[in-house]
Image (spheres, grey):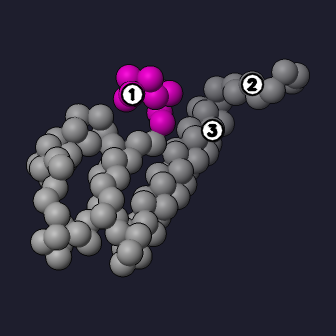
């Protein structure tokens, strides 16, 4: 599925029901080290969540927002750099 993702897509691996693992009511289906290695391989972030405890979900959205803001800032910086060097940047279909 990762191979089908659009270039530059922000990816997050999310494990759920971490409360069951923490309370020793269940075992992990995948070792944390394996998840972290897969996330690193695909430049993704990994999170563990619990809907029951309401934990981890906010961190996912915070990460997505921060990543989006960083990409927007990088584009803005690139445009400013192009203006500073006199490079032309054509937007849209006119001008």
Q: Nearer the viewer, mark 1 or mark 3?
A: 1
Query: Residue 13: where, in percent of width, then height?
Result: 34, 47
Looking at the picture, tell me which residue is in the foreground, 60 or 80: 60
Whether residue 81 appears in this view of the structure is no
Query: Residue 6: where, in percent of width, then height?
Result: 50, 27
Q: Residue furthest front?
A: 25
Looking at the picture, tell me which residue is in the foreground, 42 or 90: 42
Q: Kindly check if marks 2 and 1 are in contact, taking CB atoms under 8 A apart as contact.
A: no
Q: Within 10 angstroms of label 1, few (less than 14), some, or many (20 or more) residues?
A: few
Query: Residue 26: where, in percent of width, then height?
Result: 17, 64
Q: Which residue is depicted at the point 38% across and 23% down?
A: 3
**Magenta span contains residue 68:** no
Residue named by callout 3:
79
Residue bounds of the magenta highlight: 1-9
The number of numbered discs placed on residues in the rendered structure image is 3
* Residue 41, numbered circle: none
Q: Main secondary structure of the magenta part?
A: loop
Query: Residue 48: where, in percent of width, then height?
Result: 29, 61
Q: Within 10 angstroms of label 3, few (less than 14), some, or many (20 or more) residues?
A: some
Residue named by callout 1:
1
Looking at the picture, tell me which residue is in the foreground, 57 or 92: 57
Location of residue 86 by image quarter: top right
Find the distance from the CA under tag 1 to the CA under tag 3: 33 Å
């Amino acid at each position: 599925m990762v191979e089908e993702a659009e270039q530059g897509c922000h990816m997050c691996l999310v494990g759920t029901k971490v409360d069951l693992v923490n309370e020793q009511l269940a075992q992990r289906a995948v070792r944390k080290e394996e998840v972290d290695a897969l996330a690193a391989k695909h430049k993704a972030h990994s999170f563990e969540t619990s809907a029951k405890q309401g934990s981890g979900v906010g961190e996912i959205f915070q990460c997505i927002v921060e990543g989006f803001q960083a990409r927007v800032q990088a584009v803005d910086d690139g445009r400013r750099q192009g203006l500073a060097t006199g490079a032309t940047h054509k937007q849209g279909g006119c001008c």
